[in-house]
Image (cartoon, rainbow, N blue to C red):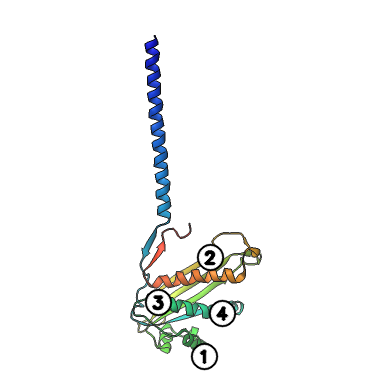
Amino acid sequence: MAGRRRLVAAAVSTSLAAASLVAGGCAAFGAIGAISAQIDREKQIEVLAEYDGLRNRTTAVVVQSAPAMSYEYPTVVANITANISRRLAENVEGIQLLDPRLVLQWQYQTPHWAALPYGRIAEELGVERVVLIDIYEYRLHPPGNTWVWDGVAAATVGVIEAGLFDTDEFADSFSVTVRFPDMEGVSRESASASQIETGLLVKFYQGTAWLFFDHIEDKYPDD
C-alpha cells in the first residue's frame, strides 16, 4: 500500500512538472508573439510613386481653393504651393520646378485661369506637367464647434500633361485627405490654432508629395 502511494505521488509530481513546462512554454510563446507584433507595428516599408511622370520634366504646382476658404485662411494656398514644390524639387529625379512665386503671380494676374482647359494652363505656364491641387475641404474645427480641434485637409490632386489629345482631362488624379490631431476630443485649451494648422499642413504636404516619388512609410501609420 505504501508503495502504491509513492507511485501515485510520483505520477502527480511528474504531471505537475509537465504542466509547469507547458505553461512556461505558452508564456514564452506569448512573450515572443507580443515582441514580434511590436516589431511588426514598428516596421517601415518602401512605397512606390503613384505617378512617376514628373521625372526630368518641367513642372508647376498650382493650388486652387474656394474663395471662402482663401478668405478665412489667406496664407494656405501660398504655403501649399511653396512646400509641395520644394518637396518635389528635393525628391523627384531631374524635375525642374517653376518658381512658386511665378505661379502665384500668374494666378493673380489671370483671375479666370480655373476656367481654362487643362492643356492651356500648362501652355501658359510653359511647362510639360502641372500638379493641380484642388482643395475642397480645409478646417481646424468640426462644423459649428470651435471648442474642439478636429483639423481636416482634403483635395483632389490631378496631373496635367502638356500635349495630350484631350486637353481638358487629367492624365491621372488622386484624392488626399488628412486629419490632425489623430485623436478625438482635443479641446481648444490643449493647443493653439497655429499648432493645429502646422500639424495639419505638414501631414498634407507629405501625403500629397508622396504621390510622386518612391519613399519609406510606417507600415501602420495610425498606430
Mark 4 or mark 2, which has the lower sequence index?
4
Using the numbered discs, state the Cα–Cα distance from disc 4 to disc 3 in whole angstroms. 23 Å
Mark 1 or mark 4, which has the lower sequence index?
4
Q: Amino acid at mark 2?
A: Arg
In front: 173, or 94?
94
Return the x and y of residue 29 as percentages of the image width and height: 39, 41
In front: 180, or 115?
180
Circle number at residue 179: 2
Q: Amino acid at mark 1?
A: Gln
Tag 1 residue: 109
Using the numbered discs, state the Cα–Cα distance from disc 2 to disc 1 in whole angstroms. 33 Å
Circle number at residue 75: 4
Using the numbered discs, state the Cα–Cα distance from disc 4 to disc 2 in whole angstroms. 19 Å
Return the x and y of residue 144 as percentages of the image width and height: 65, 67
Return the x and y of residue 4 as percentages of the image width and height: 38, 12
Q: Secondary structure at mark 3?
A: helix
Mark 3 or mark 2, which has the lower sequence index?
3
Disc 3 vs disc 2: Cβ atoms closer than 8 Å?
no
